[in-house]
Amino acid sequence: IAGITQAPTSQILAAGRRMTLRCTQDMRHNAMYWYRQDLGLGLRLIHYSNTAGTTGKGEVPDGYSVSRANTDDFPLTLASAVPSQTSVYFCASSEQGGANNEQFFGPGTRLTVL
Amino acid sequence: GQNIDQPTEMTATEGAIVQINCTYQTSGFNGLFWYQQHAGEAPTFLSYNVLDGLEEKGRFSSFLSRSKGYSYLLLKELQMKDSASYLCAVKDSNYQLIWGAGTKLIIKP
């Protein structure tokens, strides 16, 4: 049972380049999320999807886009990376987007933008 | 604005008990979560409280007071493997999780 997988594990990227972080879950969860985690700050929600075909903006969506073509996959794209997007990115999923659903996290992608 | 406050770092001794506090101010409340995160790893779920009171799960317990905007995580019989960051998060009126910055717990032998 894989749960949630993310790729790549880490990446160094030149500023201005386009990058897609991949996320796949095999739990048939309806809701998926992208967070970034920076030192001294809490996890911040970038984008989310409550079900396949729908997406929504979180707290810090600027510079990022997502798509949810099917239940399993939720890629995050940085159209033109900037150094402030250097962070650890976590993908998560939950059965539903409702109140008492715990979120399960992928192993994270460590991204450095130079 | 929305705010979750937790101590940045705490130190405790192996075998002892430690209480990690969390206070919150959010637009709406739909439950409070505690997660554990070991260095370099993903957060993993520990507990969920939506009603006032204490929820016990083995060595870990979590308490909630909605009127005070307050929760704590109680860890008993501390083990070295409990050295980790503990994250408090609240689901707001939009059912989105608002996260605290986490409390780094250092366990000494």
Image (tube, rainbow, N blue to C red):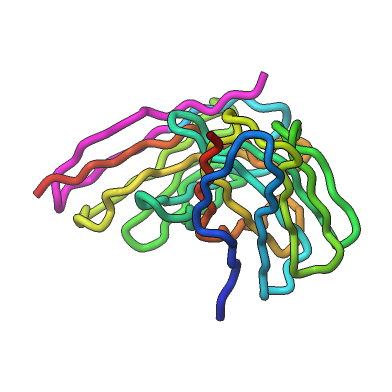
Image coordinates of residue B48 in percent, x first then y, are 55, 51
Count the numbered circles shown. Answer: 0
Depth order, front residue of B90/A12: A12
* Residue B40 located left or right of residue B82: right
Residue found farthest to the top: B1
Depth order, front residue of B50/A3: A3
- Residue range in magenta is B1-21
Depth order, front residue of B100/A22: A22
Depth order, front residue of A15/A45: A15
Image point 72% across, 37% down: which residue?
Answer: A80
Image coordinates of residue B27 in percent, x first then y, are 72, 27
* Residue B103 located left or right of residue A4: left
- Asked if the magenta segment contains residue B3, the reply would be yes
Image coordinates of residue A47 in percent, x first then y, are 75, 44
Quadrant of the rendered image containing residue B2: top right
Image point 63% across, 31% down: which residue?
Answer: A82
Task: Mark yes or no: residue B45 visible.
Answer: no
Residue found farthest to the right: A53
Image coordinates of residue B106 in percent, x first then y, are 23, 42
Image point 19% across, 40% down: which residue?
Answer: B12
- Asked if the magenta segment contains residue B15, the reply would be yes
Quadrant the N terminus of chain B occupies: top right
